Image (tube, rainbow, N blue to C red):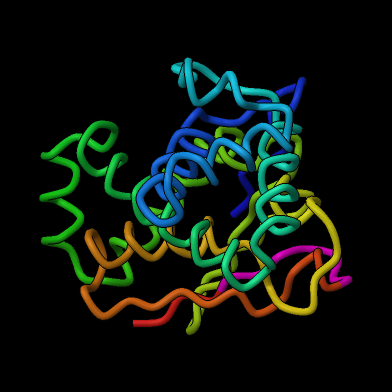
Amino acid sequence: MDGGAAMAGGRIGPNAITRMAEAMRNSIGEARARAIFAAAGLEQRLDHPPAAMVPEREVTLLHRAARDALGTAHATQLARRAGMLTGQYLLAHRIPKPVQWLLRALPAPVAARLLVKAIARHAWTFAGSGRFSARPGNPLVLEVAGGPIALAGPAEQPVCDFYTATFGTLFRALVNAEAQVVETQCTAMGATSCLFEVRW
């Protein structure tokens, strides 16, 4: 299953900015969050949170600034929290309640296929100019190639915790409460794409 390339222009949904801001403020405080956003050239995003799609470069710059200021381990923890908040937002505001009820009522493999199809249809909102695809199986493998988070710079560990947590929140809520998502390869480590294995 292939979500195709992103829409021209490489734009990302505002949650990639607003949930990072929320996670930072709650974890490291307003002053440090503002310093990181300022280092990324995005301080205005704290004062005027985006309500529409943002240039994907802003996401890359924000994650780079967070890693520079906090170190990769702490920055990815914040990204994981932001991804969880994003998943919760999608469940509360973007995925209709009847659809959620239906997915929970279906056998997990069927629900997973339907959820992945929905993710693929909306991949341009989180992958920017990158590409999303999925391979069925056990584990289910989700792939993001050319996504903006990994492009923030090289790392010695996978860094796309924002995606890991967003996917995990959705799969646990809609497919199986025991679902786990792990990033097994990352562009930041030199791989050609970022892979996420989903198990339940």
Q: Residue at x 17, y 63 (%)?
A: 106
Closer to us: 186 or 176: 186
The x, y position of residue 158, in whole percent, is 68, 73
Task: Quadrant for the N terminus, please.
Answer: bottom right
Q: Is residue 114 in view? A: no
The x, y position of residue 140, in whole percent, is 50, 74
Let me know if residue 71 is in the magenta part. Answer: no
Q: Residue at x 30, y 64 (%)?
A: 110
Which region shows up in magenta? Answer: 190-196
Q: Residue at x 29, y 40 (%)?
A: 89
In this rendering, position of residue 158 left or right of residue 151: left
Q: Residue at x 79, y 49 (%)?
A: 146
In this rendering, position of residue 152 left or right of residue 46: right
Closer to us: 20 or 169: 20
Closer to us: 114 or 173: 173
Q: Residue 196 falls in which quadrant of the image?
A: bottom right
**How many discs mark residues in the rendered view?**
0
Q: Residue 30 falls in which quadrant of the image?
A: top left
In this rendering, position of residue 96 left or right of residue 154: left
Residue lying furthest front in this view?
31
The x, y position of residue 35, in whole percent, is 62, 39
Rendered position, 148 above or below 183: above
Task: Quadrant for the C terminus, please.
Answer: bottom left
In this rendering, position of residue 77 left or right of residue 99: right
The x, y position of residue 172, in whole percent, is 27, 67
Q: Is residue 41 in view? A: yes
